[in-house]
Image: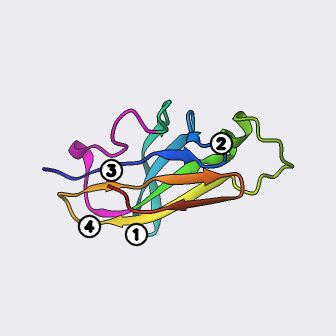
Amino acid sequence: MTGYLTTHVLDTARGCPAEGLRITLFAIEGGARRQIAQAVTNADGRADGPILPASEFHPGRFELVFAAGDYLRASGLEAEEPLFLDEIPIRFGMSDPQAHYHVPLLLSPYGYSTYRGS
C-alpha cells in the first residue's frame, strides 16, 4: 500500500457537509510554498478523490488552505466584512510513506477544528 492524503469539510453551524468549498494543497520545501493540488468539495463535503493520490504521494511538510470565507458568503452568511474567518491554513507533516493521512475541517463562521482522521 502506498500513502495518500484525503480531506473533507463539515459545516458544524448548519449541520451539513460543506459543498463547494475550494481547497488548495501546498508542499512546504525549505520555507517556500509550492501549490501541488486543488479541489472543490462535493455534496458530501469531500474532494472527488484523494487530494494527494498514491501516485504523487511523498513524505514531507504540507499546507492545506481552505477557502472558508468564499464558502460562508455563498452559503448566505450575513456578517460584516471582513469575515472573522477567510482562508484557513493547516500545516502538517506526513512521514509514513505507506499511511493514509486524512485531515478534516470542522467549520463554523467563528471557529474551526481539525485532527488527523482515518
Residue contact at pointers 1 and 3, CB within 8 angstroms: no
The quadrant where residue 27 appears:
bottom left
Residue 111: x and y in percent read 66, 60
Q: Which label sits in the foreground, 3 or 2?
A: 2
Mark 3 sits on what residue?
5
Mark 2 sits on what residue?
14
Q: Is residue 83 left or right of residue 43?
A: right
Residue 1: x and y in percent read 12, 50
Residue at (26, 67) in percent of width and height: 95
Residue contact at pointers 1 and 2, CB within 8 angstroms: no
Residue contact at pointers 4 and 2, CB within 8 angstroms: no
Mark 4 sits on what residue?
95
Farthest left residue? 1
Residue at (33, 46) in percent of width and height: 52
Is 12 a magenta residue? no
For marks 1 and 3, give the CA distance. 21 Å
Q: Is residue 89 left or right of residue 100?
A: right
Question: Disc 3 marks which amino acid?
Answer: Leu
First reached walking from the N terminus: tag 1 or tag 3: 3
Q: Nearer the viewer, residue 13 or 110?
A: 13
Farthest front residue? 15
First reached walking from the N terminus: tag 1 or tag 2: 2
Region rendered in magenta: 46-61
Residue 83: x and y in percent read 77, 52
Q: Which label sits in the foreground, 4 or 2?
A: 2
Q: Is residue 45 left or right of residue 85?
A: left
Crowding near pointer 4: few (<14 within 10 Å), some, many (20+)? few
Q: Is residue 82 above or below residue 115?
A: above
Question: Disc 1 marks which amino acid?
Answer: Gly
Say what secondary structure mark 2 lies in.
loop
